[in-house]
Image: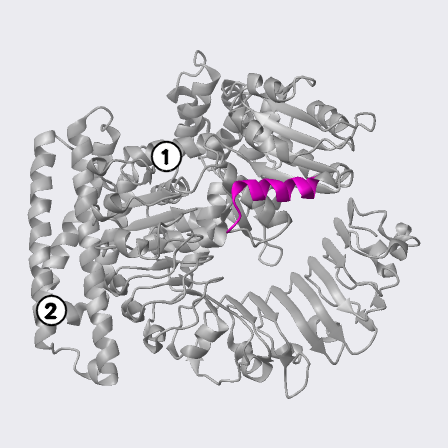
Amino acid sequence: MAESVVSSVVSNVVSQLASLVTQEAAFLRGVRDQVEWVKAELSGMQGFLKDAESRRKGDERLESWIREVRDVAYEAEVIIDKVKYMAERRRQRRGFVGSISRYSHKPCELIRLHKIGSEIKKIKGKIRGISERRARYGIANLGEGGVERSSDWDDHLQALRQFPDHYFDDTDVIGFKDDKEKLVKLLVDPENKNRSVISIVGMGGLGKTTLARKIYNMDEVKQHFDTSIWLTISQKFDVRAILKDMVKKNISSAIEEMNEEELRKKLYDFFKDTKYFVVMDDVWDGLVWERIGPIFPNKNNGSRVLLTSRNIEVARSIDPSIDPHELHTLDDAESWELFCKKAFPNQHILEELQDVGRNLAKKCGGLPLALVVLGGCMSSRERSHLAWSEVDKSIEWEFMHKDKRCLDILALSYNDLPNQLKSCFLYIASFPEDSTISASKLVRLWIAEGFIPQRPKQTLLEETARNCLDELVQRCMIQAVEKSGGYERVKGIRIHDMLHEVGISEARKDEFLHVCSSDMAVSNGISTHRAAFNNVVNNEVATSSPHLRTLLGFNLVLEDSTAAGKFLNGLNSLRVLDLEGAYGLQELPEQIGDMIHLRYMGLRNTGLNRLPSSIGRLLNLQALDVRNTGVEWLPKSFWKIRALRHIYIHAYTFLSAPIVGDHSDLQTLKIEGYPCLETRYKVKMDRLVSLTLNFYPIPGDILFARAPNLHHLRSLRLHGRVLFKQRQQLPDSTQFPPNLTELVVSHSELEQDPMSVLEKLPNIRLLELALIEISGEIMSCSAGGFPRLQHLTLDEVFDLKEWRVEVGAMPRLTHLTIANCKKLEMLPDALQRMTALRELKLIRMPCQFNEGDRYKVQHIPSIIFEDEP
């Protein structure tokens, strides 16, 4: 598939125009024919785009023509938003009366429609010009062959769900058994008391990070050291950011006012009294060790630093006493094994594909990254000799240098992505290199950008987006680094730096995204519709780009409290504004209400104290995240926004404007804080998927009165004392949401054993009880209880002395964590019959706790003890 992301843009706009004509037919009236004409022309252009994109390389005329098509599609999308906005404003203003008089227009509405008609005429003129140049350039209509049908895409996603779970495990270390054993031996060597730096070196794509992470997660290694820390350095490293991250995660969160020297001292004091293990991944320059190395004291206690680098000289300069460990490429047998694991995830290798498959694997030159990405690419190809042979013959790889060969394979895999996935993949390149990206945030951003097409009503956009994420994992274009226990879905992802490089290159070529540097000249401007700023925002660059649809900020430091008003001035076409973590952000301008296209506002972890009242005018807003800010107020008009899908707010914010109205699209509602919340409210939230309440007390009567109707709710988190029927108790199991898979209850006092209720929930897969007081000293799980539970955590269940588990309870339990249950005397006998149990964690439990229980858990592959007194 040689098509660029422009094909996907045009396809999405055509779908939106068709929907607009159907849903807002009465409102459009005089401009409907013009909208129909634009839809027909853009639809017809899709066949011509396929030809232009196949011949674009090296032809500036075709490149320019494709850009013109993209820009006119975006302009049409702006018109769509304006019409929908006007129609929604009218519904809000008129209510029931408006539905009766839907065929009449106020004079002001007629004026706006006239303006829209004028804008459509301009678009029609541009389309005619594009069509004339198309004929002049000899661009042919290759028909609908390049346009993916919705039904084909749905069938493909359905097939994806049949891939086995192990396919999403990105910790494959094939061919590195000897390397792993040698490195572990060096790390835990009892004879070497010096602080030593051990290096893994090799070219990009060899698997250095994968091997280091496998070693880092080994129980044998973790239990050998007091503290284990993973640092991602990367080519463009920020020493202060690295130091801050270490302090924040391991010592204290109060670090914003610390200078670099104070951070160094705090870390040195932390490490001097501990036996530590630190991984420094992706080191490009020895300077980073000169700047960071002094915080790691040599106290002759066997501390270790494991370093990965492409440059062997950098590794040698850091610790000349230990030879760097050079990774080798895989041999033919190892290459074939790794390739098959990705290309044939169902374990069945077709005989007719053996020869061509082995040839493809051999051409990867033994590079693990090339093998897994090409294998992932072939897993979605037609299982025929002809289809696979086409790939085999497409590029002459034999005489390429391995670096170039790997990049070509990665580019081939990108080009093989369906159009809808290309935009999703390129968007990931906007995030800083080597960062871990929240999967749920990425899904919200994709939806706000319009990358995810609307499927039949029964399919949520979030579900389709999650399937897209899973396919990128399946194709090995991204790595899944964390998985949710309840949803059994990916929680965090990372992209290899070489794939990140491919993404940046392709995004630049298609003018999809611009990653802006701090020294970028205003004269250069931003020709793309999306911009990502790292560390600082150049105000002049931003304001000189009024066409921007997306502004992403990473690790921003704003010069003063008025900075946001400066760089946001005039950016009224924004659909996405993400300033998460921006230091110095205290206020947003009132003009934010003019950004009527805005769908996503990410303001988490900022110093923002107040939202402008004009936010109530953002009728397209889908997601608002003001967690860990000072925002405690919303205008009452906010809850009139019917497009809301994901809301993260403080409890005081919620009380300032209680939720009302129809919010049938709302998927996530997270309310944090500690005021008493007794207010009753009537609201339609039947499609809610995730609900988090963090306040004191939680009104159980109100919550559970509606719960049985929340058929889509999968995650429920209750942080606070639950009051139900004026007692501190949980309701009967029939009053919980029927399809709940994840439940967390914390900071609560319960008058009865919670297990007697919770074990009857048929779909629970993850259960966490933390900081819980129960009236008795015994908890009991009955035979047949918790039929689907996989992850169970008991953390500070006060006064619990005995946990009884009957044989047959929790038959699918795979992960069990018991922490800080100081009075618990022993493990249940039934654990020895739980054959599915793969991991047991005992955290801060008394030394004598496990003395007589070894026989109960000896069958469990992974047993982890942390912080034993």
Task: Return the residue nearer the eye: 795 or 88.
Answer: 795
Which residue bears the numbered disc 2?
29
Is 477 placed above or below 85 here? above
Judged by its main secondary structure, the magenta piece is helix
Of residues 22 and 514, the one nearer the viewer is 514
Q: What residue occupies the far bottom of the structure in this picture?
A: 726
Name which residue type carries label 2: Arg
Where residue 596 appears, x then y in whole percent?
Answer: 25, 62
Q: Is residue 436 magenta?
A: no
Rendered view: 60 above or below 119? above
Residue 184, picture quadrant: top right
Comparing labels 2 and 1, the label whose residue is closer to the camera: 1
Magenta segment, which residues? 257-271
Please give the residue where the numbered disc 1 appears in the rendered image.
504
- Please tell me which residue lies in front, 521 or 490: 521
What kind of element bears circle 2? helix
